[in-house]
């Protein structure tokens, strides 16, 4: 059986894990918005794209914007979990902490999964657009 100190350390580790998870998602949000921003502001010759390139560009930009929004929702939900974990830590009652983490990530893990797929799926068409712009 775990001692009280071990239980408190467990809750601290869960809070730290949730914080690291949020940090990774922040990086993805910045990357998604940054990629969209680069294509919208840095390339003045977007009018020279073929029809296929234009469609790929707009679908990719939409996917990146939607991915950034879903990442934001996910971080918002996990922030609530971190607050609850901190409350368990302060109350020195670590029993519900694991249940809280599992609940949050089961309920909102689909947001992260879908956002990751949108982000990854937008990269290939953007590469095609970039090649078309440079060529």
Image: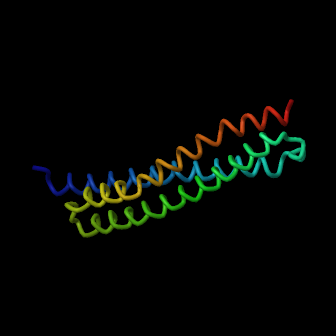
> Which residue extends farthest left?
1
Residue beneath the point at 47% across and 51% down: 112
Name the spot of residue 124 as percent of width and height, x first. 66, 35
Quadrant position of residue 93: bottom left
Q: Is residue 40 above or below residue 79?
A: above
Q: Quadrant of the C terminus?
A: top right
Q: Is residue 21 above or below residue 49?
A: below
Name the spot of residue 65 as percent of width and height, x first. 64, 55
Name the spot of residue 72 as percent of width and height, x first. 54, 60
Quadrant position of residue 92: bottom left
Residue beneath the point at 53% across and 45% down: 116
Residue beneath the point at 75% across and 52% down: 37
Name the spot of residue 16 as percent of width and height, x first. 39, 53
Q: Is residue 99 left or right of residue 83?
A: left
Q: Is residue 65 left or right of residue 83?
A: right
Residue beneath the point at 51% across and 48% down: 24
């Amino acid at each position: 059986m775990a001692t009280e100190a071990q239980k408190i350390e467990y809750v601290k580790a869960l809070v730290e894990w949730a914080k690291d998870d949020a940090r990774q998602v922040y990086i993805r949000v910045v990357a998604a918005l940054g990629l969209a921003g680069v294509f919208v502001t840095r390339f003045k010759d977007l009018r020279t794209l073929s029809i296929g390139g234009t469609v790929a560009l707009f679908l990719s930009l939409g996917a990146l914007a939607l991915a950034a929004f879903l990442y934001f929702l996910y971080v918002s939900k996990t922030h609530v979990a971190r607050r609850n974990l901190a409350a368990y830590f302060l109350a020195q009652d670590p029993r519900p902490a694991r249940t809280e983490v599992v609940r949050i990530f089961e309920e909102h893990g689909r947001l992260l999964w879908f956002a990751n797929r949108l982000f990854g799926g937008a990269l290939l068409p953007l590469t095609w657009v970039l090649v078309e712009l440079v060529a």
